[in-house]
Image (tube, rainbow, N blue to C red):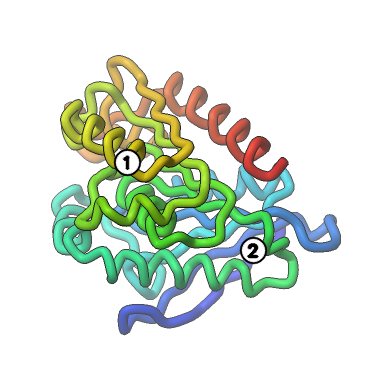
Amino acid sequence: MHTEVLKYEVNGLNMESVLYFDETKTGPRPAVVVFPEGFGISAHAKEKAQRLAALGYVTLVSDLFGEGKTVSTLAEVMAFVGPLMGDPERIGAYAEAGLNALTSRPEVDTSKVAAIGYCIGGSVALELARLGANVKGVAGFHSGLTTARTENAKNISTKVLVCIGADDPMIGPDIRQKFAEEMNAGKVDWQLHLYGGVVHSFTNKEADTRGEPNILRYSASADKRSWESLVNFLEEVFA
């Protein structure tokens, strides 16, 4: 597996994103930009990107903090996420920079690119769709669903998948309903998968170490089901 750090600048920060692809394959191929949780480019995001690369995709785990920084507590995450969620232009800059870093690579078939994200990374991926980016699909997992500019749903020209824990205290029924209304108003081809008894960060095996089990908790079954949904979704959008 080829692994490489791509460096570029966005929002005044020096970004260090991580690229993966199978070097035994030749020619341009479909690609996926992976926006990580608010904890940064952790083992979780890298593992997901590596698994996708093993399926034949070129993948890029896109830096959000700069310098490839990671944090370890929910308080640190919220201090970053809070201001960011009210600033769609800043989110869009992160999203477009990561996408451009990936599509600049010669290994990438630029007509077949998707964006996925986890937690705040899912919010970033969705904002990329709202910007009208030229991607085939966008997927979010335990993803933030709100935006300061719901009217931008009309710009979405791609398919959308979101996978959410039904008991996630951060993404309750009212938020999910508003997201559904936003997607319908924009005439988007969208899916929402709910997992019963599941809270936030259900795809991250490190979630149980955060000390917030009522908020952050790994679910092996939801992780497996959402991964299978992603694999099927990518096959569909790249067909």
Residue at horizontal 75 percent and vertical 56 percent from the top:
29
Give left or right: position of 86 versus 190. Answer: left
Which image quarter is the N terminus in?
A: bottom right
- What is the secondary structure assignment of the residue under circle 2? strand
- What is the secondary structure assignment of the residue under circle 1? helix
| Quarter assignment of residue 95 | bottom left
Local crowd at mark 2 within 10 Å, few (<14), some, or many (≥20)?
A: some
The residues tagged by marks 1 and 2 sit, at their Cα atoms, a distance apart of 41 Å
Is residue 37 at all visible to an observer of this figure? no
Which is more toward the observer, 80 or 87? 87
Mark 1 — residue? 185
Residue at horizontal 55 percent and vertical 61 percent from the top:
134
Local crowd at mark 1 within 10 Å, few (<14), some, or many (≥20)?
A: few
Identify the amino acid type marked 2: Thr
Which is more toward the observer, 107 or 206? 107
Which image quarter is the C terminus in?
A: top right
Residue at horizontal 20 percent and vertical 50 percent from the top:
73
Q: Position of residue 180 (x, y in %)?
A: 30, 33
First along the sequence among labels 1 and 2: 2
Which is more toward the observer, 200 or 97? 97
In the image, residue 167 above or below residue 157? above
Residue 38, disc: none
Q: Position of residue 197 (x, y in %)?
A: 28, 16
Closest to the camera, between mark 1 and mark 2, is 1
Residue 3, disc: 2
Q: Position of residue 226 (x, y in %)?
A: 48, 29
Identify the amino acid type marked 1: Ala
Q: For the view shown, which residue lies furthest in the top direction?
A: 196
In the image, residue 140 above or below residue 213? below
Give left or right: position of 176 versus 159. Answer: left
Which is more toward the observer, 113 or 47? 113
Check if mark 1's residue and mark 2's residue have beta carbons within 8 Å.
Answer: no
